[in-house]
Amino acid sequence: MSSRPSRRTVLAAGLSVPAAARIPAPAPAALSSLLSVDYARLAARADLHYTKPVSRSEEGLPIGNGRMGTLLWTSATALKLQINRPDVFASSCESRSFSERHTDYSGGCGYVDIGFPGLEDVFSGPDFSQHLSVYDGVAATAGQGVSIRGFASMQHDVIALEVDDRRPQPGPVDIDLRMLRYALEYQAGRNWELTASHTVAVRHRGQTAALRLDIRNGRILLTQEFREDRHLSTSAVAIAVAGRGAKARFAGETTVR
């Protein structure tokens, strides 16, 4: 049995459209409240908060700007960082020096340790906490009498750390810049030159890695240079202190402080 619409049904349906169009629109204030989003509160759902130190460096708080970054984790006496970049490669796709799987490496530029001589277990116990604000991009670490806030600049390849020394008598703060890799190798005719320039050269088959510590104008530096045939990749990490006097010195074959 067919159910073809009659002329009266079609007219009734047509008359219902203007009736629906007469529904009043939401007031501007109501519409504004629907579109208002508290982005800080929304992003805070992804914040990280630690009440005890992590057991592995991979679990540290991440900060970065897409070009360079680090994780922040702690030992009992220091805040630790590993500065990384996505454009640092120890070898290229043409390398013949790393034929075994998982033996090549890339990304790492240097270790940074911020310590407080004279304070034992500064980052342990009930005073410890770490918090990452995803909205602000700020990582905060608190310990016994000290706290450190860190963030990565979006405009420049800079990671800034603010140290708040709340001890009754503020004490020294050590900032160590360390090589990622170290191997003591005999370099015929070059040992004195390398030692005098605070350089470590490591050769792996056809690839050479040269890591050099330096002090320039009160800043401490670590440079890396990787060479193999036509491949060349370099990196540099420089650290300066603002707001407090500092003295730079070499603290061993792999560290400048």
Image (cartoon, rainbow, N blue to C red):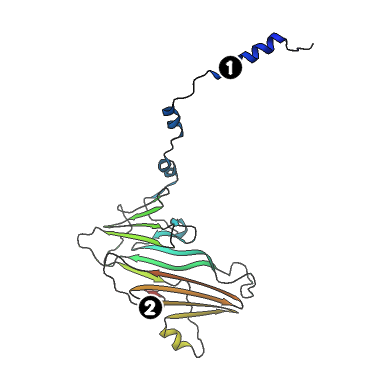
Amino acid, disc 2: Gly
Residue at the farthest left position:
168
Which mark is first along the chain, 2 or 1? Answer: 1
Question: Between 43 and 45, which is closer to the camera in this rendering?
Answer: 43
Q: Which residue is labeled 1 in the image? A: 18
Disc 1 to disc 2: CB gap under 8 Å: no
Please name the residue shown 62% across and 67% down the image.
101
Could you tell me if residue 257 is visible in this image? no
Q: Mark 1 Cα within 10 Å, few/some/many (few <14, many 20+)?
A: few
Q: Mark 2 Cα within 10 Å, few/some/many (few <14, many 20+)?
A: few
Image spot of residue 4 (x, y percent): 76, 12
Residue 165: quarter of image: bottom left
Residue 124: quarter of image: bottom left
Say which mark, if any, is on residue 242.
Answer: none
Quarter holding the N terminus is: top right
Q: Which residue is labeled 2 in the image? A: 252
Image spot of residue 248 (x, y percent): 32, 74
Image spot of residue 54 (x, y percent): 41, 56
Quarter holding the C terminus is: bottom left
Q: CA distance from mark 1 to mark 2?
A: 85 Å
Residue at the farthest bottom position:
189
Q: Is residue 77 left or right of residue 179?
A: left
Residue 162: quarter of image: bottom left
Image spot of residue 74 (x, y percent): 38, 60
